[in-house]
Amino acid sequence: MEKEGWGFDFKSYTQLIKWYSTFGEIEEMKSLFMEIEEKGIKPDVYLYTCMVSGYCKMGDLVKACKVFDEMSERGLVPDGYIYGALINGLCKSGQMEAAEVRFNEMRSKGVWVNRCVFNAMMDGYCKLGNVEEALRVEGVMEGEGYEPDANAYNVTGTGLRKLDKHDKAKRLLLLMVDRGVVPNVLAYTTLIDIYCKQGDFVEAKMIFSEMESEGIKPYTGTYDTLIDGYFKHGNFIDAKRAFREMETKGVKPSTKTYTVLIDGYCKQGDFVKAKKTLFEMESNGVKPNTNTYTVLIDGYCKKGMMSEAYKLIMVMESKDLILNVYTYTSLVHGECKLGKVDNALKLFNEMPTKGLVPNVVTYTVVISGLSQEGRLDEALRLYNQMIEAGVIPDAAAYSALSFLVAQLEWQR
């Protein structure tokens, strides 16, 4: 830094390290940190916080923990901010055991735990589907004198919703209102999503209207929730109306919005509108992703339109979009539906070469296809392979197995 005409100034170094940390420029951040140490200057807690935060942003939690521990070994006392940065990083990466250790360590040392740390812990547990632990953390937070805010309620409400515990989630979010906590846009959107999943569009619209009357503007995700809900319950006119309203109010549709629309049109069997929406999306500067193409491919496969599906695969590959498990499963299903089980097996066997693990649906489709063709030994081998791979059969898989067993008994 000095070679470029800069004199040594600790404050400037600190600001640069913070900047590099914020934008993920890890090598530059490390280089400046080492320069400071080479000059015999001891980094302070703030600098270590920047380093920990930078490593967390890049997902390198091993180095983040190493830097944190190194700081403690040097006699510096960690404060709430550096603990918060590390715990937040661990929670985002799903390392909840490690996060819990740091969280308990922080509290046992009497370090101030702020609301953001509690919310990060709750969010981390909810993302792993462990809502009970999230609610335990919420109890600890209340015991420390914090009333849960809209973010805290939304985290646990969303966690319950993802576990299909809609009534419980709804009660929790309505309790928030009763306690005088003003819902934020995410909490309102979660409530709308719950009502949409339950098919109660009267309540969903009432919540939507209440949200607007409170001066909270719906964002893209709010409209995505409504549009998806309408399509899934066959309310195609309302779905299109919500999309038009969204555009009228200046809310820009996202990739997810267009994907939901394309999926809805495919489920209607209207592939002309689905393709038209894809073109409109691209002309509006919104890039389709793997999910966008997959919903259209899935629609074609379900109708046996495999040539159209493979055309889209070529488009995806030309755009360097990677096929995922769902894309392959759709193709496998389409081939089996047409009785082309060997083509399906070829795709199935290609998946591991692409780093993809077939899911229960992929296995079930191929097992059913083989059984239908009378290739019972192959079907049974594949079922055993699924069990050995640790894939848990669902109702459809057990149904396929029942058919297979019946066929084998009939042969005997």
Image: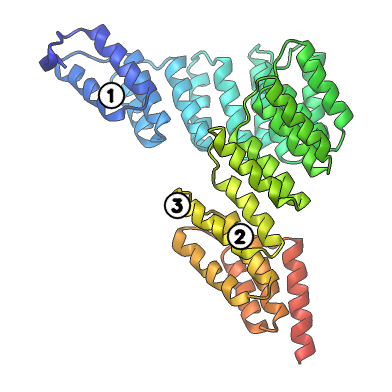
**In the rendered image of this protein, does residue 403 appear above or below residue 19?**
below
Task: Give residue 29's mark.
Answer: 1
Q: In the image, residue 55 lies at what x, y percent?
A: 37, 30
**Three-letter amino acid code at disc 3?**
Ser
> Which mark is in front, 3 or 1?
3
Specify how the rendered protein is coloured: rainbow
Q: What residue sits right under mark 3 in the picture?
A: 318
Number of labels in the image equals: 3
Distance Cα–Cα, label 1 vs label 2: 49 Å
Compare residues 244 and 263 and report the one nearer the observer: 244
Mark closest to the chain's N terminus, 3 or 1: 1
Mark closest to the chain's N terminus, 2 or 3: 2
Quarter of image, res 340: bottom right
Quarter of image, res 210: top right
Q: In the image, residue 207 lies at what x, y percent?
A: 82, 22
What residue do we see at 36% from left, 19% from top?
50
Element assignment for label 2: helix
What residue do we see at 72% from left, 62% from top?
303
Q: Residues within 10 Å of mark 3 (few under 14, many from 20)?
A: few
Quarter of image, res 245: top right
Mark closest to the chain's N terminus, 1 or 2: 1
- Work out whether residue 391 can be spotted: no
**Three-letter amino acid code at disc 1?**
Met
> Which mark is in front, 1 or 2?
2
**Three-letter amino acid code at disc 2?**
Glu
Furthest residue to the left?
Answer: 3
Element assignment for label 1: helix
